[in-house]
Image: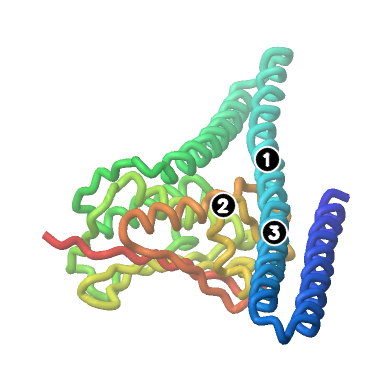
Amino acid sequence: MRITSRKKTIAFAVTLGVLVAAVALVLNISWIVLNWREVVPLVLGVLFFGFIIAGVILNTIFLVREVRRNEQQDSFLNAMTHELKTPITSIRLYLETLQQRQLDEAQRREFYQVMLDDTQRLMGTVEQVLRAARVTQKNAVLNKTEVDVGPLVQDAVELARLRHHLPGEAIAWELDGRPAERLTVAGDREELAAVLSNVLNNAVKYSPKEPRIRVEVVTPDLERVQIKVQDNGIGIPRGELKRVFKRFYRVMTPGSTQVKGSGLGLFIVRTITQRHGGRTWAESEGAGKGTTVTIELPRYQP
């Protein structure tokens, strides 16, 4: 119902803007016809109606953007409510069970592990929100050091395997065919680790029950390092490839509605990468054909 209402609001705003612009255009043409011999009134009239038409068009664009922005923020709030409420409800349920029932040691250990996982999920959600706020601060300072790309990727891969309980073969990675070469970038290691963590988490979440993810580090030239994360997931329609990096934006494709999240992951990835002088982009052949996210960073220059 809410989505239908927003679509009607957007349609009304666009229709009204078009009608007002059309009326202004007709009046402008009429003014030209009636005053074509009078130069000064003609010029002033054309400029006046031109400003009216431009104002109407800009106002319509602004209204449509505001409606869409409100929709994205509502989606974010709904997602965040679920991401916060679900683990809290789960933890409370297990604690009440532990309080009211006598359980054997195996069951107690199982309950403790579930509660620890839920706590980790809750902490991850809170950290995402805090990081999104932190990376958008204009006065935020980067603690740049020389970061070795190999260990950075290795740590992120191992963390993703552990967090999602994946076997070793689920995430494979390699280093540009030259394992002996030490590739380094200048940056904040903690933030770069967050970038890789977000990309890998997305790759796992949007992949089938048996994800197959490949991480590759390549050097297209002497000045850049690229980290490519390729998955076998649900893919992204081509028209959505740039939008997925916007704040609160989530792709609505078959299968994606079952995946919960805040809509902040790829926004954080793009923002941090840009702060490091790099860029990020996504590639996909379409729905069901997987996605490749590329993180490009400048190499460290001593």
**Helix, strand or loop status at disc 2:** loop
Mark 1 or 2 closer to N-term? 1
Residue 237 visible from this viewpoint: no
Residue situated in front as seen by the camera: 296 or 98: 296
Which class describes the residues within 10 Å of circle 1: few (<14), some (14-19), or many (20+)? some
Residue marked by disc 1: 77
Q: Nearer the viewer, mark 3 or mark 1?
A: 3
The residue positioned farthest toward the front in the image shown: 38
Q: Position of residue 217 (x, y in %)?
A: 33, 68
Q: Position of residue 219 (x, y in %)?
A: 28, 73
Mark 3 belongs to which amino acid?
Answer: Asn
Mark 2 belongs to which amino acid?
Answer: Arg
Left or right of 115 in this view: 134:
left
Which class describes the residues within 10 Å of circle 2: few (<14), some (14-19), or many (20+)? many
Residue 84 visible from this viewpoint: yes
Mark 1 belongs to which amino acid?
Answer: Leu
Instruction: Tell me the CA gap for discs 3 and 1.
Output: 27 Å
Q: Position of residue 130 (x, y in %)?
A: 48, 36
**Helix, strand or loop status at disc 1:** helix
Left or right of 267 in this view: 62:
right
Residue situated in front as seen by the camera: 251 or 177: 251
Tell me, yes or no, whether the two marked residues, 3 and 1, touch with CB atoms within 8 Å: no
